[in-house]
Each structure stands twice: as C-alpha cells, then as structure tokens.
Image (cartoon, grey):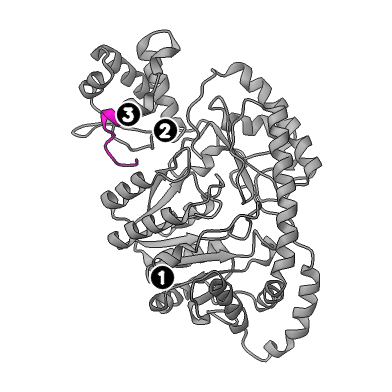
Amino acid sequence: MTGQHLPASTLSGLLGGWSDAGGPAYRSLAERLRLLIADGRIMPGARVPSERELTDALGVSRTTVASAYRELRDRGYLTSRRGSGSVTSLPSKVEPELGRHHAPGIDTDGLYDFTCAASPAVPGISTAVAEALEDLPRHLATPGYHPQGLPELRAAIAASYEARGLPTSADQIIITAGALAATSIVVRAMTQIGDRVLTESPTHPNSVDAIRRSGCRVVAVPMSPGGWDLPLLEATIRQTSPRAAWMVVDFQNPTGWLMSAADRQRLAIAFARARTTAIIDETLFELALDGQEMPPPFASFDPAGVITIGSVSKSFWGGLRIGWIRSPEALVSRILDARGSLDLGAPVLEQLVVCRLLADRVGVLAERRLGLALQRDALAAALRSELPSWRFEVPGGGLSLWCELPSPVGSSLVGVAQRNGVLVVAGARFSPDGGLESFLRLPYTLDPDTLRDAVRRLASSYAGLEAAAPVRRTAMIA
C-alpha cells in the first residue's frame, strides 16, 4: 500500500476487534495501528484516513482518533504532511540490525546459523569437477569469454524448459554468475533510473537491494495470509504502472507459498495490460518436497513479456555460482548489451561442471529433496514442541519456514539468540519498506539433530523476551 490512500472502510477491517484490549480507547486504537504498521500489513508511506473519516467508520469520538494519531506521530509511526494528510512511517532504528551483512559460513564456529537458506553441496560434485577438468583443455585455446554462456550448457537449460512445456531455444538462454547477478543484469536492461519495480513483501532482501542500486523505486505489495493478494496486486499495477516486476512464485522466499496456475495466468494478463515486464525468479522451482505436480512456468502465460531467472545455487550448490536468464528472443540483444558493463561471462569450468550435474539431475535432486523434507519436518516438529505459541505453515517446498511470533520482538530476538549461540535474521530484513517485526525466517538446511538443538536454544532466548512483551495476535503475512 506504499504511496496509496488507505480508505477508512479498509482500515476499519484491518483493525478488527481493536477495542477488546481494554484500557483507554485511544491507546488501544494507537497500539493496534502501530502493530499493523510494524508487521507490514499497512506499508510505510500509505496515507491514512482523516480523523473525521476514521471517526465515522469506527463509530467513536473524534477525540479518540485524534489522540491515537497524536500518539503514533509521537512514536514515529505517523508523519503529517501539509496538504496531503498523514502517512504511515517507521521510527528510526536505535541499533543496527545484527546479522544484516553476515556472510554465511564465516566466523560461525560454535554457532547455529539460520541466516542462510542454502544447503551444502549435493553428492557427486567432486566427480563432476573431475570430469569437467578433462574437458577443459579444449577451451584453453580460446579467450575464455562467453557473454551468453557455453553452447552446451545453454542447450541443456533450454531442454529443461522444453520438458516443462515451454518452448525454448538455446539462443534464449544467457548464463550468469548466479541468480542475483541475473537480476541485476535484467533490471539494468529493462529499466531506467527512477522507474518503479514491483515486488512482494516479504521477499528476498538482496534482490531488493540490487533493484534499488539500479536506481529504481521499489513498490512493495503485502502478501495475504493465503499467499498473493491478486486484487491488491492488480490494483497496484494499475495505479503505479511499474516498468518491471520482480517476483518469486515457486516456494516464495521467505513464505514458501506456491502460486497456482490460475493466479499465474491472471497476473500475467495484468502485467501484459500494463506493459510491465515480469521478471520471475525460479531458483527454488526444483525443490518441491511433497511430490506435487508443479504449475506451468509463469512465462508460459506470456512468452513474449516474461523474463525468467534460474540458478543451481539452491538445488546443487551455491559455491558453483551459476545462474541463467531465459529471455524472449526479442530482448536477448538488449540484455547482453546491459551485461557488458557488469561482467563478460560466467567461469568456463563451473559451466562445464553444471553441464554434468544437469545430465544426472533426476537422481541428484531426488536425494536432495528427500533430505530437505526430513529436515523440514524435524524443524516443524521441534518448533511445535519448544515454541508452541509460534505459528507457521509447512510449505510444500523451498528451504525455510516463515514463523509468526505472538509479539513484535523479531529484531530484539536476533541479539539475544546470538548470545545463546544461534544466528537468525529478523523478519524486518525481508520487508522492502520495514515492518514484519513479528516474523522470523528459519531455514531447514541443517541436519535434524542440529535443528532440534538450535530450536531449544532459540526457545530459551525467546522465553525472556516473551515475558516482557504484550501478547497479541494478528493474521499471518505468509
């Protein structure tokens, strides 16, 4: 709802039973509004109803609403602008968020690391490297620069799209140094400084950072308790006319939601009408853990208007740093031109390694999925046992659980947990505009015994915070 007017009727529905909390009415109203802003259900920058409009909608006195707004302004959650009413905001953080720039696997001895949703390498990578080294000499006589990627790897990736029912030629594939590099390249190719790019909230923070560093303005749309809010997405697309949209529709990071085929078609139509280029990140597509049939690729619903990003970092190993772009034919040259100022291609040896892994992907991925399913279930069971007040939906795939805490103490928990040997990232890091303080992402990429012990430490860390926090419960944003 960034930059939009929030109608009084809509806000009244979000407030729910705010008056049931007891105490002075204005304080109950202010606290409920604060929690909605902190949790991202009302995005920063949204214009709230006037005092008169909200008074009429809630059936309370004008003094109650005025006093609630004044308290929110005093606490930094509301800012008044002359001529445009009051808009929501977030107070400046007193302390920097711990773990924001933490490098996974670095200086983590003796710590349980929940900051990175990525698994160790799959078995067979050493063999694939050895085989790739045998093939490397024939490439040594060339300069080694392949801006579009090795032909054999592009052909293998194109064939994987063909197998999913999406006709693709090797000429439509561009190999990159990972999915994040692919995102940066595509955003640079398809946008100009100042353009709007639509994303979900919550979402992958590093990709949002890459979008912003390209000079674009991020328009974040909150997810609903059941996944994507299609009416809100469609309304935001109409109102903001974003030049591009970056989204994860396969086991979305961090919520784990999977977008249905019907919703993909509906959203693709909305993007096409607005001439918005959809950039769809499929890095988690391979990690369906319950044997379910996956929906068609998003690009199937608009082959000429959708750019797809893929990677082996989640399925095989992040250390390979190989990703790719599947582009409509008409945009390939434009994307390659944009790439020239960023890098000149991905490493040849790693591309040869990925070629061999893709040839054996069925067996390799079956083992990966089995291990992740066991770890997911172990983490879910440990949380139910040790932290029964936390809420989460067990996703059908992906790499993490998106947990809702009873109180907005996510950032506070980060520091306490680190002192108890557990590294976590607060939910606020996954919001492009702040908030989500009642949420925490917990990857299930450690072994089951480690996950169980880590949750016990996390529960001990949370116990002290829970005793001091006011208990509340809102709808999940997941």
Residue at coordinates 22% horizontally, 19% vertically from top-left? 56
Residue 166 is situated, as x and y percent measured from the top left of the image, at 49, 71
Residue 330 is situated, as x and y percent measured from the top left of the image, at 38, 78
Q: Residues within 10 Å of mark 1 (few under 14, many from 20)?
A: some
* Between discs 1 and 3, the one toward the N terminus: 3
Circle 1 or circle 3, nearest the eye: 1
The three-letter code of the residue at mark 1 reads: Pro
Q: Is residue 121 at all visible to an observer of this figure?
A: no
Label disc, if present, on residue 11 of the rendered structure: 3
Residue at coordinates 32% horizontally, 50% vertically from top-left? 234
Q: Is 248 placed above or below 63 here?
A: below
Circle 2 or circle 3, nearest the eye: 3
Q: Is 135 placed above or below 85 here?
A: below
* Residue 322, image quadrant: bottom right
Q: Which residues are magenta?
A: 1-11
Residue situated in front as seen by the camera: 37 or 402 = 402
Q: Is 3 placed above or below 164 here?
A: above
| Alpha carbons under labels 1 and 3: distance apart | 38 Å
* Between discs 2 and 1, the one toward the N terminus: 2
Label disc, if present, on residue 303 of the rendered structure: 1
| Alpha carbons under labels 2 and 3: distance apart | 18 Å
The residue wearing badge 2 is 90
Is residue 10 part of the magenta span, yes or no? yes
* Between discs 2 and 3, the one toward the N terminus: 3
Question: Helix, strand or loop at disc 1?
Answer: loop
Residue at coordinates 34% horizontally, 40% vertically from top-left? 1
* Residue 98, image quadrant: top right
